[in-house]
Amino acid sequence: MANPAQGAKYRGSIHDFPNFDPSQDAEALYTAMKGFGSDKEAILELITSRSNRQRQEISQSYKSLYGKDLIADLKSELMGKFERLIVGLMRPLAYCDAKEIKDALSGIGTDEKCLIEILASRTNEQIHQLVAATCTRRGN
């Protein structure tokens, strides 16, 4: 059995990208979505190599540069599971978790694996943020 202290050392694999420039990244995403179709590989490479905090800055920079919502543009350019992945990565973690829990509880049956994955792997602080995001999503 692995040492619990050792596991904590490896939690999370996305770190801040060095020499990060949110304006430059916003321009790269705009270029990747410009014209007919989109450069999905460029979008995936950029978004998955930035931390969540950096992705939030890119979204703000995109709004400042182009006057448009980055998530709305991504939704219009992408589709299916790829769209769900990219849009989920662009949202704050608590918001994404709240959406996944809502989806796991919706419809016939419950996706217990999803609930366990999220609830068992988050810290107390992250659970409190999740509850706040859930209330925000419902308008409470």
Image: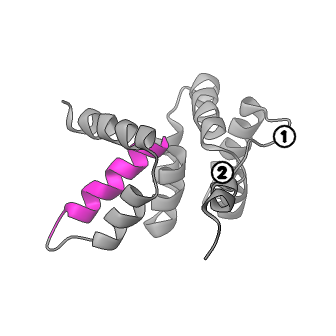
- The image quarter containing residue 124 is top left
Residue position for label 2: 47
Res. 71 visible in picture: yes
Q: Secondary structure at mark 1?
A: loop
Q: Residue furthest right?
A: 19
Disc 1 packing (10 Å; few <14; some 14–19; many ≥20): few
Q: Nearer the viewer, residue 96 or 114?
A: 114
Residue at 27 percent of width and 60 percent of height: 103
Say few, some or many: other residues with alpha carbon within 10 Å of mark 2 (under 14 / 14 to 19 / 20 or more): some
The amino acid on which the numbered mark 1 sits, given as a three-letter code, is Pro
Q: Residue at x 37, y 56 (%)?
A: 119
Q: CA distance from mark 1 to mark 2?
A: 14 Å
Q: Main secondary structure of the magenta part?
A: helix
Q: Is residue 70 magenta?
A: no
For the point 32% across and 63% down, the residue is: 115
Q: Is residue 39 visible?
A: no
Q: Is residue 103 above or below residue 124?
A: below
Which amino acid lies under the numbered mark 2 shown in the image of this protein?
Ile
Q: Quadrant of the C terminus?
A: top left
Q: Eyeballing the image, is 81 above or below 96? A: below
